[in-house]
Amino acid sequence: MNQKTKTTAFPNFRNQILIFSLLLTLFASQISNNLYAVEKDTLKGHWDITIDIDGKPAPAWLEIRRSGPKTLVGQFMCVVGSARPISEIHVQDRKFSFSIPPQWEKGSNDLRVEGEIEGEKIYGTLQTVDGKTQTWTGVRVPTLRRTASPVWGKPIHLLNGNSIKDWHTEGTSQWVVENGVLRSPKSGVNLVTNEKFNDFKLHIEFRIPKHSNSGVYLRGRYEVQVTDGKGMEPALDQMGAIYGLLIPNEMVAKEAGEWNTYDITLIGRMVTVVANGETVISNQNIPGITGGAIDSNEAEPGPIFLQGDHGPVEYRNIIITPAK
């Protein structure tokens, strides 16, 4: 080999090494991106969460979804209040984290969540706005999809005259019943049916004074909002809404102090709400539990409960027709 051949061969060899290194880097980057995408897709979905608060379980709910090719966002409902938006969820090595500002809690810090996925479960820690650290576990929410239309059973009157023997409270009850009207004259405890239900149709009538607030919880997990919303725009926190999750398509509330009616059908997680004769939510999917839920065990039957801790309210003609 002459000198001229030698001087042209080495640059070509170096170029080949450079191209190979570049391809290897791109390949490794592609693998990393694919793994990152798999991690994100594995986390995507809805999760029912149980938080350990000083040895007592408390419900929460998490939604994780894509926003573009590289970003995860979502919603988080933590024990009380409504589902709060998450602007970005950070993911690395099957671990994830996010933070959101306080809502109803007393404290100035962000609520911070760290978690890890393991199969079909997630677990981690939560730092509250007052600096306390709690552990939690989560499972994917059940679809609750039904394969056949329900066959309805016999209607059950949940108010029998002046008796509330079919209901109970935790703590001292402020609820009274007179002439077939169930009344909570002041803020106090919630009222819960002794019996639990799966799919059902519910008729209930309510009357609420101005500026008061209550709610009807379906299976004890999904709140249908009760407010004096006359003249207001439909909203996630006003009459007819599944609180914080589903907005009614119109506001049909009567004047404060007048009787309103709800006819609610819940099949799986599909809900229809007819308020004062108008369908305001039509066969919509409830994505998760609402604030104040009794638990996050969505696959299980649950009670009807009436919110009594937000001011005076009256109910009457409470009739439930369960599916067989």
Image (tube, rainbow, N blue to C red):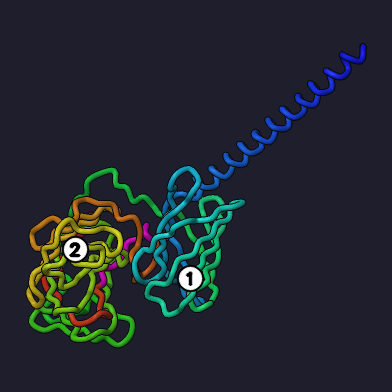
Name the side, left or right, on which 6 lies relative to 310: right
| Residue located 25% across and 67% down the image | 237
Is 19 above or below relative to 282?
Answer: above
For the C terminus, which image quadrant?
A: bottom left
Q: Secondary structure at mark 1?
A: loop
Question: What segment is highlighted magenta in the picture?
Answer: 298-305
Asked if residue 288 lies in the magenta stretch, the reply is: no
Residue, disc 1: 110
Quarter of the image where one finds residue 245: bottom left
| Residue located 26% across and 75% down the image | 307
Instruction: Give 11 or 212, whichever is nearer the viewer.
Output: 11
Give residue 292's mark: none
Where residue 24 sits in the image (x, y, percent)?
Answer: 70, 33
Instruction: Give 314 or 144, whichever is nearer the viewer.
Output: 314
Whether pointer 2 and pointer 1 mark residues with C-beta atoms closer than 8 Å, the reply is no
| Residue located 38% across and 63% down the image | 84
